[in-house]
Image (cartoon, grey):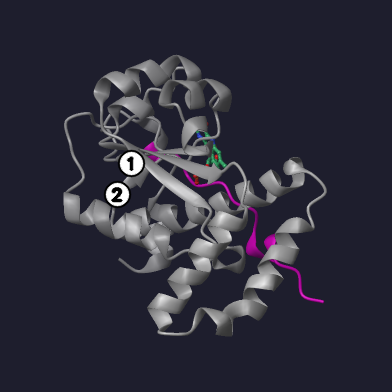
Amino acid sequence: MEYIEALKWRYATKKFDPNKSVPNDTLKRILEAGSLTATSLGLQAIKIIRVESPEIRKALLPHCYNQHQIVDASDLLIICAHISVGEEHINEYIERIAKTRNQNISDLNGFKNMISNFVDGFDSLEPMQEWLARQTYITLGTLLTACALEQIDSCPMEGFKPKEISEVLDLESLGLYPTLLLPIGYRSEEDKNQHLIKVRKPITDFVSNI
Ligand SMILES: Cc1cc2nc3c(=O)[nH]c(=O)nc-3n(C[C@H](O)[C@H](O)[C@H](O)COP(=O)(O)O)c2cc1C
């Protein structure tokens, strides 16, 4: 499918068909697309949790304003930001670059110091967490586009209580904070929203030339 057509085809799916599952290889490609997303400094301080257990999904429902997509969709992805980034994370990243590109760690000292200075530049945890959360929204964009190209339906969701979701999944102990939910699967024939005409500003209002 041509990509503009695919983006017109996708919509925030309100009702999924609970009887249809996304094939494993398709899900794998979508997740790989997510991992290929650009992130600030390349740090990838992100984790996607795939909730497989139907019981856990049900337990999350009251904390998502009962949005049934999270139980009916084939798969539920929880996009999480790291709660913070520190020395350990930066070292791990530098080691990964050195190994992947067959470089000496010492050759990366300048880059490492640049990252450390950037991270140390946050006055407190709050602006750092805002920066970390922004990275997850870029990942969401990539996942939505990948889903559309694969003809997999999805619903980006901010309508949930992060503290409660975090408690149910014990995310804090993993150093994670949930920023977005992404149920993916196949639209139900009963979902009336699939027939709605997409509402977007005219492109001339969306883009301005200076
Ligand atoms: C960050 C974000 C959060 C959203 N949260 C929800 C949500 O909690 N529940 C829902 O049904 N739709 C949610 N949406 C879907 C939007 O309402 C939808 O994308 C928008 O109305 C445009 O419609 P379309 O995606 O069908 O083209 C969210 C979208 C984004 C990007």
Dominant secondary structure, magenta: loop
Badge 2 residue CB within 8 Å of ligand 1:
no
Mark 1 residue type: Ile
Rendered residue at 45%/47% (across/down): 47
Using the numbered discs, state the Cα–Cα distance from disc 1 to disc 2 in whole angstroms.
7 Å
Residue beneath label 1, please?
Answer: 184
> Do callouts 1 and 2 mark residues in contact (Cβ within 8 Å)?
yes
Residue beneath label 2, please?
Answer: 152
Rendered residue at 54%/45% (across/down): 81
User: Is residue 105 positioned above or below 128 on the image?
Assistant: below
Answer with mark 1 or mark 2, whichever residue precedes in sequence. 2
- Residue lying farthest to the front in this orientation: 106
Which image quarter holds the C terminus?
Answer: bottom right
Residue 36, image x and y in percent?
Answer: 42, 66
Query: What residue range appears in magenta?
Result: 194-210
Residue 40 occupies which quadrant of the picture?
bottom right
Which image quarter holds the N terminus?
Answer: bottom left
Residue 208, image x and y in percent?
Answer: 75, 69
Q: What element carries label 1?
A: strand
Residue 11 occupies which quadrant of the picture?
top left
Rendered residue at 49%/21% (across/down): 167
Mark 2 residue type: Ile
40 sits left or right of 175 in the view:
right
| Residue 197 visible in rendering | yes
Report the front residue among 8 and 80: 80
Q: How many dots with numbers? A: 2
Asked if residue 207 lies in the magenta stretch, the reply is: yes
